[in-house]
């Protein structure tokens, strides 16, 4: 067999070389030639300096090589849509996981791949595969929840979808990047078993099953080594044990050295080669600190990915088939948002609503009139459009139902800009609007203004270097740094009330109203924000002065105002009291679920709990709709509210999806991908987050999420896998066959017989267990049920979870319809990682199979024995 294989390869090499020779071009330029010979041919033609130049980026691209015709590799952020100009905003990663539908996620990945191509991007920097360890995690919304098996299925589906469009997917952040607090310095201490059982499976599946062509290393340290210079992580595990043939790129700015990073297995330093460059890496090679073979391997991996995905052969042109904002993508975004929403509570079957029986609806809350499409940071997508719940409800019920809207309270980061109609410039002509602006070319408001003009709005956000579009925000003679502005005039409100003013700026800002200091933030601080509340009289002109300075970095300022929460609450309660039903849209926003910071609390933001309690007191028929990227604690209000729907961050079709569910056009089918706890103290990470002295200890080990709640016998608010429906489902006739199997112990990783050697998922070889059962829709509506299969090792030599998710199926059934479901459990469903053997093992004994609608709602039980 080996001789035959060698002959085939040799013939391919000869054939490719002959084709290239006939066409008068190098072998690596021949698209019909085999992949590895093309890589070898090009690599042999590169100088050492050219090879090293390829190992550092230029922002969101790699360096092109004009001499050899090597194109740049273009990239874009985008776990939930392409973050490049405008793109379709799909539901957040946690929402994708809540769908429990890998086929749906594959279609989302493919759509994102097509949009990446339309933007001329070759690489998508996603998906985010970090396990939800702590509910406060700022990037939980990007990931696929707390369970490694569910995350693995979503990872494989997503990567396959993206890469079927010939766009490189980049699973991130490798590894154990589970908090944003001190993410650039924290050392995560994780024992070997926990690493293999909880934090690595999704990455392994993405590499071995979906053949991801890139992996991004994380910011943090792992067991004492930066992830980007961690040889155990990048070389031993990723490249040797898992057989990864693609490239490892760093997260942006996550490289701290040249030779240690190169030797550890990082192949590409992003965004720029500040360390892996000719000045630092070349001397290290010449001194013998880094072998030429190490450099060659890195270049080989980059070229291999480029050839495999057709980047080289496009000669800088976007891949064919790229499209943006198509009707199909819009409908997919809506479908995904519907399938992701989880019905948490529905007492008295308040839902679904019958629009024909309603005369009035109060639509209330800080998330009612805004589509909370996603969280903040590198996953933030700018959609072509978005639909708010208020807009969608109005459209759904039409003109026959009266809609009363009230925000009820404000949300951090959502100030309404001072509208020009309320402003009059100092010294301006009668009827003019805005404020008189004086621009100075220093940060002290000193001397004569360089420019004077009328600014209608006090709002701009500029980069370090102005784009042509941004230049219009600053007058001629003012650069993007080292300037200051004074705006003067008057403010005339049209309503007597308390108003909350918000000033957000980078750098300093202060606001004077009626001759007194209202807000004082006169310090150099990025994105500083200040608030103040004051009572104003209607139709009274208040002198106003706003001062701002920008020292360095990005320049931004936003001055906003709104009615104070006390005023908003009073109006919302009145609207709820007069309505047939109150729809209350609360939760979080991109100001809370954000890259770079973790949440301060698990409770809802200030005044929202008070709002919920006031609204349900005014109208017991209240439905709460939540936006969040992770669990929120709801103990102060959940027992008072009859219905709760978790919508996550649903993407651009947020409102349409929510309206379809509330009014019964579709039946909810989402299930929780993470445990909703009653209090922070119940979390397995409590006491071990955010860490001390630059280190965070994962002391809970493998007991993450529901594993901890089950072992400690803690009742969660809503368990992992939980989700209600408008219909009901019965589980019947469980079969587990065979009743006994023989499974061999683990094989060494270097054994040719080990599953990893064939590029398959660990543990899939050997006997299998078939689990079969029936599901019947016993209700009156069509609906989808997620049947979950858990396995329990009844007696083990190491502490094991009470139950572990090992399979699931999502089944759509009409009323009265019954369907047989069959899943397969292989060796991986029984194995645990043995730290003494450094391998996966299955111990003889009895295993229980638990089939249910959630981790705590087990409907069927069976057993099998391993001999």
Image (cartoon, helix red, strand yellow):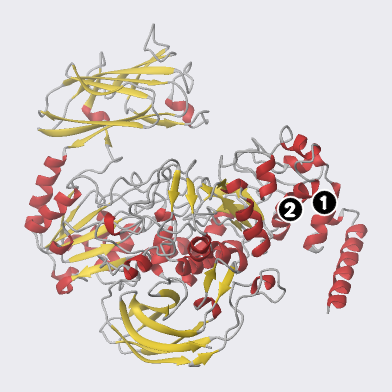
- Residue at the disc numbered 2: 303
The residue that disc 1 covers is: 42
Picture quadrant where residue 645 is located: bottom left
Residues under numbered marks 2 and 1 in contact, where contact means CB atoms less than 8 Å apart: yes
Q: Position of residue 532 (x, y in %)?
A: 20, 30
Percent position (x, y) of residue 819? 40, 89
Instruction: Tell me if 355 is positioned left or right of 73 in this view.
Output: left
Give the residue at x 39% y 49%.
Answer: 138
How far is disc 2 from disc 1 in space, using C-alphas?
Answer: 9 Å
> What percent of the width, then of the height, locates residue 28?
82, 55
Residue at the (55%, 61%) spot, across then down:
203
User: Relative to 836, does residue 416 appear above or below in the rendering?
Assistant: above
Who comes first in sequence, dot 2 or dot 1?
1
Say if residue 739 shows up in the picture: yes
> Is residue 382 in view?
no
Q: Position of residue 504 (x, y in %)?
A: 32, 31
Instruction: Locate residue 2: give its quadrant.
Output: bottom right
Disc 2 is placed on an element classified as helix
């Amino acid at each position: 067999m080996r001789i035959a294989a060698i002959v085939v390869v040799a013939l391919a090499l000869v054939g490719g070389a002959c084709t290239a020779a006939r066409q008068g071009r190098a072998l690596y330029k021949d698209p019909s030639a085999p992949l590895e010979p093309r890589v070898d041919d090009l690599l042999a033609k590169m100088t050492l300096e050219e090879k090293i130049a390829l190992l550092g980026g230029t922002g969101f691209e790699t360096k092109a090589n004009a001499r050899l015709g090597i194109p740049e590799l273009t990239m874009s952020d985008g776990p939930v849509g392409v973050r490049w100009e405008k793109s379709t905003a799909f539901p957040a990663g946690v929402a994708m996981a809540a769908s429990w539908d890998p086929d749906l996620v594959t279609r989302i990945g493919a759509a994102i791949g097509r949009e990446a191509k339309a933007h001329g991007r070759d690489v998508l920097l996603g998906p985010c595969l970090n396990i939800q360890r702590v509910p406060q995690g700022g990037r939980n919304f990007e990931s696929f929840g707390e369970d490694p098996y569910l995350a693995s299925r979503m990872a494989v589906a997503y990567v396959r979808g993206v890469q079927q469009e010939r766009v490189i997917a980049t699973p991130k952040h490798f590894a154990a990047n589970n908090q944003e607090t001190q993410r650039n310095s924290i050392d995560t201490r994780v024992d070997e078993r926990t690493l293999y059982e909880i934090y690595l499976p999704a990455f392994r599946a993405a590499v071995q099953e979906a053949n991801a062509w890139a992996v991004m290393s994380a910011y943090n340290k792992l067991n004492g080594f930066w992830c980007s210079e961690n040889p155990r992580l990048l070389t031993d595990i990723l490249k040797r044990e898992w057989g990864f043939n693609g490239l490892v790129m760093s997260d942006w700015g996550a490289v701290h050295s040249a030779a240690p990073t190169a030797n550890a297995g990082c192949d590409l330093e992003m965004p720029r080669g500040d360390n892996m460059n000719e000045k630092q890496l070349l001397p290290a090679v010449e001194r013998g600190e880094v072998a030429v073979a190490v450099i060659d391997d890195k270049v080989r991996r980059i070229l291999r990915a480029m050839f495999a995905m057709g980047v080289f052969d496009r000669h800088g042109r976007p891949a064919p088939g790229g499209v943006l904002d198509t009707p199909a993508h819009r409908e997919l975004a809506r479908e995904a948002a519907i399938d992701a929403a989880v019905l948490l509570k529905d007492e008295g079957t308040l839902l679904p609503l019958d629009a024909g029986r309603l005369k009035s609806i109060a639509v209330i809350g800080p998330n009612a009139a805004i589509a909370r499409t996603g969280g903040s940071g590198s996953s933030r997508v700018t959609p072509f459009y978005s639909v708010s719940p208020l807009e969608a409800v109005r459209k759904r019920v039409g003109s026959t139902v009266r809609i009363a809207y009230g925000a009820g309270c404000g949300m951090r980061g959502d100030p309404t800009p001072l509208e020009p109609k309320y402003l009059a410039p100092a010294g301006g002509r009668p009827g003019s609007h805005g404020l008189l602006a004086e621009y100075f070319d220093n940060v002290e408001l000193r001397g004569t203004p360089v420019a004077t003009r009328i600014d209608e709005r006090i709002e701009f956000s500029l980069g370090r270097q102005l784009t042509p579009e941004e230049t219009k925000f600053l007058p001629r003679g003012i650069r993007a740094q080292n300037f200051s502005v004074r705006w003067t005039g008057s403010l005339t409100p049209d309503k007597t009330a308390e108003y909350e003013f918000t000033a957000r700026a980078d750098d300093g800002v202060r606001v004077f109203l009626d001759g007194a200091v209202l807000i004082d933030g006169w310090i150099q601080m990025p994105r500083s924000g200040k608030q103040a509340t004051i009572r104003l009289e209607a139709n009274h002109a208040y002198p106003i002065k706003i001062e701002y300075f920008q020292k360095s970095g990005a320049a931004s300022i936003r001055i906003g105002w709104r009615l104070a929460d006390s005023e908003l609450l009073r109006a919302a309660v009145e609207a709820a009291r007069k309505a047939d039903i109150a729809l209350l849209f609360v939760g979080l926003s991109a100001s809370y679920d954000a890259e770079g910071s973790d949440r301060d609390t698990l409770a809802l933001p200030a005044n929202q709990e008070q709002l919920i309690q006031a609204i349900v007191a005014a109208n017991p028929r209240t439905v709460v709709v939540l936006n969040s990227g992770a669990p929120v604690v709801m103990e102060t209000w959940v027992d008072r509210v009859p219905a709760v729907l978790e919508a996550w961050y649903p993407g651009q079709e947020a409102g349409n999806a929510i309206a379809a569910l509330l009014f019964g056009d579709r039946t909810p089918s989402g299930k929780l991908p993470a445990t909703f706890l009653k209090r922070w103290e119940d979390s397995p990470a409590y006491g071990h987050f955010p860490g001390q002295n630059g280190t965070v200890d994962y002391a809970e080990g493998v007991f993450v999420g529901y594993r901890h709640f089950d072992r400690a016998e803690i009742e969660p608010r809503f368990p992992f896998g939980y989700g209600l429906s408008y219909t009901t489902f019965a589980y019947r006739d469980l079969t587990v066959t065979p009743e006994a199997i023989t499974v061999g112990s683990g094989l060494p990783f270097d054994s040719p017989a080990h599953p990893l050697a064939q590029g398959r998922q660990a543990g899939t070889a050997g006997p299998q267990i078939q689990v079969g059962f029936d599901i019947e829709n016993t209700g009156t509506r069509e609906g989808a049920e997620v049947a979950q299969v858990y396995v329990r090792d009844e007696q083990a030599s190491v502490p094991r979870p009470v139950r572990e998710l090992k399979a699931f199926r999502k089944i759509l059934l009409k009323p009265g319809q019954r369907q047989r479901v069959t899943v397969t459990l292989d060796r991986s469903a029984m194995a645990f990682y043995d730290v003494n053997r450094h391998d996966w093992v299955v111990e003889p004994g009895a295993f229980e199979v638990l089939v249910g609608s959630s981790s705590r709602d087990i409907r069927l039980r069976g057993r099998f024995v391993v001999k």
